[in-house]
Image (tube, rainbow, N blue to C red):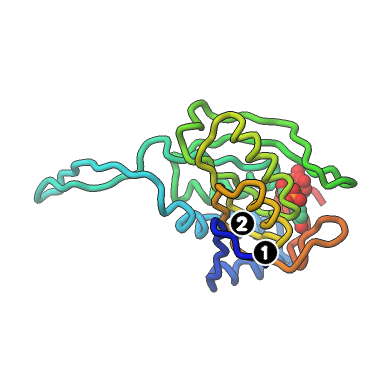
């Protein structure tokens, strides 16, 4: 696959280990949910390493010291419904104050085009880093549409976090939104004729919520 400047693909043995279990068709809904959350926490650590900070004075039992803390409202996470919801707690483990906006999107099964059905974003999202969460980046259509929307409402700094990506999805997203930083845990081989990632893990929403 062509290299893109703003794409980071994690290649970490702990993440690879968890993804191996995540893919397994025998993995239960409960395990699946826990793994998505754990992988997201590991990804958050690296994806938000440039989060803005400010200096504060802290008084220890011995003296005053200048320390750095994350600024208020630095990050808004935006899960794409449904499957992105599975990643929210994973970010909150490390970043409990991150506010949450929701974008509801499903893929038309015939055309694979994303259809938006819900959107609720926190006030002031434009002043924070918006982090789009979706475990699967397949054709890239859902992520591109969500980011189009965020830009339309004025978001200037946007990141995308996905657990599994297809080369087709990375290419489409990186070319549609070259300014967006894309963080992916693993890059899979290809899409099948139905737009599913191979080897993938199947339908992330169904596996998270037990709908099939
Ligand atoms: C899945 C997934 C992504 C999208 C990725 O959602 O959670 O949102 O597909 O595919 P794309 O990159 O080709 O757009 P789905 O449409 O199945 O909706 P659901 O989460 O409600 O099941
Ligand atoms: N959405 C999923 O949930 N899985 C895929 O493989 C592709 C899109």
Mark 2 touching mark 1, by CB under 8 A? Answer: yes
Answer above or below: position of 93 versus 16: above
Is residue 72 something that shows in the picture?
Answer: yes
As helix, strand or loop, the secondary structure at mark 2 comes to helix
Q: Which mark is residue 208?
A: none
Q: Position of residue 149 (x, y in %)?
A: 65, 34
Q: Position of residue 162 (x, y in %)?
A: 62, 54
Q: Residue at x 70, y 62 (%)?
A: 167
Say which label, 2 or 1, has the lower sequence index.
Answer: 1
Q: Residue at x 80, y 44 (%)?
A: 107
Q: Position of residue 133 (x, y in %)?
A: 60, 47
The residue at the far left in this view is 62
Q: Residue at x 79, y 61 (%)?
A: 191
Write down the residue under mark 1.
22
Mark 2 neighbour class, 10 Å CA radius: few under 14, some 14 to 19, many 20 or more: many
Mark 1 neighbour class, 10 Å CA radius: few under 14, some 14 to 19, many 20 or more: many
Q: Position of residue 159 (x, y in %)?
A: 54, 47
Write down the residue under mark 2.
36
As helix, strand or loop, the secondary structure at mark 1 comes to helix
The image quadrant in which ligand 2 is located: bottom right
Answer above or below: position of 166 versus 56: below
On the rendered image, what quadrant is the N terminus found in?
bottom right
The reply, left or right, for residue 150 in relation to residue 47 is right
Quarter holding residue 132: top right
């Amino acid at each position: 696959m062509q290299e893109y400047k703003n794409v980071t693909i994690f290649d970490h043995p702990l993440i690879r280990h968890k993804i191996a279990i995540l893919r397994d068709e025998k993995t239960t809904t409960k395990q699946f949910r826990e793994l998505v959350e754990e992988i997201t926490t590991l990804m958050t650590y690296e994806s938000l390493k440039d989060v803005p900070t400010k200096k504060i004075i802290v008084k220890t039992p011995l003296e005053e010291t200048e320390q750095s803390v994350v600024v208020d409202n630095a990050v808004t996470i935006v899960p794409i419904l449904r499957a992105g919801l599975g990643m929210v707690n994973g970010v909150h483990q490390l970043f409990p104050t991150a506010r949450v906006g929701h974008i509801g999107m499903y893929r038309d099964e015939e055309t694979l085009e994303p259809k938006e059905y819900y959107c609720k974003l926190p006030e002031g999202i434009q002043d924070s880093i918006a982090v789009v969460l979706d475990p699967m980046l397949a054709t890239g259509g859902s992520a591109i549409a969500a980011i189009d929307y965020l830009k339309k409402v004025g978001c200037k700094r946007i990141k995308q976090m996905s657990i599994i990506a297809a080369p087709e999805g990375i290419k489409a997203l990186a070319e549609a939104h070259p300014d967006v930083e894309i963080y992916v845990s693993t890059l899979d081989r290809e899409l099948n004729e139905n737009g599913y990632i191979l080897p993938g893990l199947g339908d992330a929403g169904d596996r998270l919520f037990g709908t099939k």
